[in-house]
Image (spheres, helix red, strand yellow):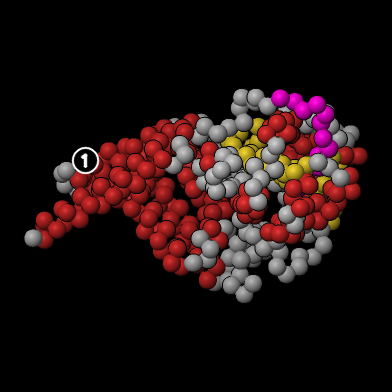
Amino acid sequence: MVSIRGISAMMMLALLSAAIWAYLILARGGFWRAAERDEPDVAASPSAWPAVVAVVPARNEADVIGRAVTSLLVQDYAGPFRVVIVDDDSADATAQEATAAAAQLSKSDRLTILRGSPLPNGWTGKLWALHQGLIAADETAPTYYWLSDADITYKPDTLRMMVARAAQGDLAAVSLMARLRCVSFAEKMLIPAFIFFFQMLYPFRWVNQAGSRTAAAAGGCVLVNRKVLTELGGIAAIRGALIDDCTLAALLKGQGRKIWLGLTHRADSIRIYDHFDDIRRMVARSAYAQLRYSSAILLATLIGMALVYVVPPAIALFGSAPANYIALATWAGMALVFIPTLQYYNVSWLWGPFLPVIAVCYMAFTLDSALQYAAGRGGQWKGRVQASRDM
C-alpha cells in the first residue's frame, strides 16, 4: 500500500509539473521566445523631433558614469536634447567623471550636474534623485524624459528609435531591457535566467497589448511622456516603490495609457557581476519586495518554484516509470524553451538542462532577501537600507 501511494503521489507531482509547463509554454504569451525586441526598427520618423531630457541618478558611480554620459551625449538625435546627472550624495568622483566625459566631447553645454539634497522619509534613493532631476529637466519643458541608469551605455540611434516608436504608437512609455553583462562564469550561469524569469513573470507581449492588465518596464532605460507622467502625479506618485520600474508601468497602464517593453541590442549594462555574491545582492535587494513582504507569498513562491523546476529532474533521475518518463519530458521541455534567451546572450545551449540548478540559486536569493528584510537590512543599495521593517 505504501508503494502504491508513493507511486501515485509521484505520478501526481509529475503530471502537475508537466501541466504547469504546458501552460507556460502554450498560454503564457510566448514569453520564452524572447521575440519582443526593438529590432528591426520599423517606426517612422516623426515630422518634428520633440525635446528630450535624459535624467540619470548616480550614487558612487565613478567607475561607469563616464562611459554612460559619453553614450548619451553622442546620440544622433535631431531634436533638442540634454542630460541631467543627479549626484546622489556620492562619496567618490562621480560628478568629476561625468564632467570630464562631457568636456572630452566638447559638449559640456548639454550636461547639467545636480547635487542631490538629503533623502527625505518615504522616498527611495533612486526615486528622490529622479524627482530632483525631473524638476531640473522641466526648465526646458521637454516632451519626453529619458530615465536612464548610470551603468547603461547606448548605441547612437537609441533615442531616435525610442522617440519614433513612442510617437508612432502614441505610447506613454517605451522601455528597453538593457543587456546585462554576461562574461564571467557566474554571469553566464545566472544572468540569462534572470531575464527568462522576468519575461515569465511579465510576458512582454502582454505588456505591450493595450487591453492586457500586465504592466512592466525595465528601469534602466525608460522614455516617458512628460505630460502624461505629470498628470499622474509625477515620480512622487511612486515615491516609496523599491521596484520602481514596474510600479511606474502599472501606474501608466492602470490609467489606460499604452506602454511598450522589449529586449534590445542597443543598450548594455556595464556593471560587473563577476561573483555569485554580486548577483545575489542584486536579486536580494528587491525580491522580497516583489512578494509584497509577505511570508505566506514567500512560502507559496518557494513551493511553486520547487514544483516547477526541482520536481521534474528529481523524479526523472530518482523516480520510477512511467512518472520518470513524464518528468524527463518536462525537464527537456524547460531546457528547450530556455534556449532563445541563452541565444540572446550568446551563451551555450548546454546551460539549458541546468535551469533547475539555476532556479534553486534564485530560490536561495529570494529567501535571503526575506531574511535581510527581517534583520532590518532590506533593499540595500550603495550603503542605504531602503526596505527596513521600521519604514
Give the residue displayed 41% in from the left and 64% down from the top: 299
Give the residue displayed 57% in from the left and 53% down from the top: 282
The quadrant where residue 234 appears = bottom right
**Range of residues picked out in magenta:** 44-58
Q: Which residue appears farthest toward the right when viewing the image?
A: 109
Name the residue nearer the viewer: 6 or 273.
6
The quadrant where residue 28 appears = top left
Decide whether residue 57 is among the magenta residues: yes
The crowd level at tag 1 (other Cα within 10 Å; few <14, some 14-19, many 20+) is: some
Element at label 1 = helix
How far across and how far down the image is residue 200, in percent?
47, 44
Q: Is residue 259 left or right of residue 232?
A: left
Q: Is residue 100 visible?
A: no
Q: Is residue 18 visible?
A: yes
Q: Is residue 258 above or below residue 286?
A: above
Q: Name the residue that disc number 1 marks.
A: 325
How far across and how far down the image is residue 102, in percent?
85, 39
How far across and how far down the image is residue 322, in percent?
17, 43
- Amino acid bearing label 1: Tyr
Decide whether residue 83 is among the magenta residues: no
Q: Is residue 101 above or below residue 231?
A: above
How far across and how far down the image is residue 14, in percent?
25, 48
Give the residue displayed 37% in from the left and 43% down from the top: 23
Q: Is residue 295 above or below residue 135?
A: below
Give the residue displayed 52% in from the left and 66% down from the top: 293
* Image quarter (top left, top right, bottom left or bottom right) of the N terminus: bottom left
Q: Is residue 81 left or right of residue 58?
A: right
Q: Is residue 121 left or right of residue 320?
A: right
The quadrant where residue 264 appears = top right
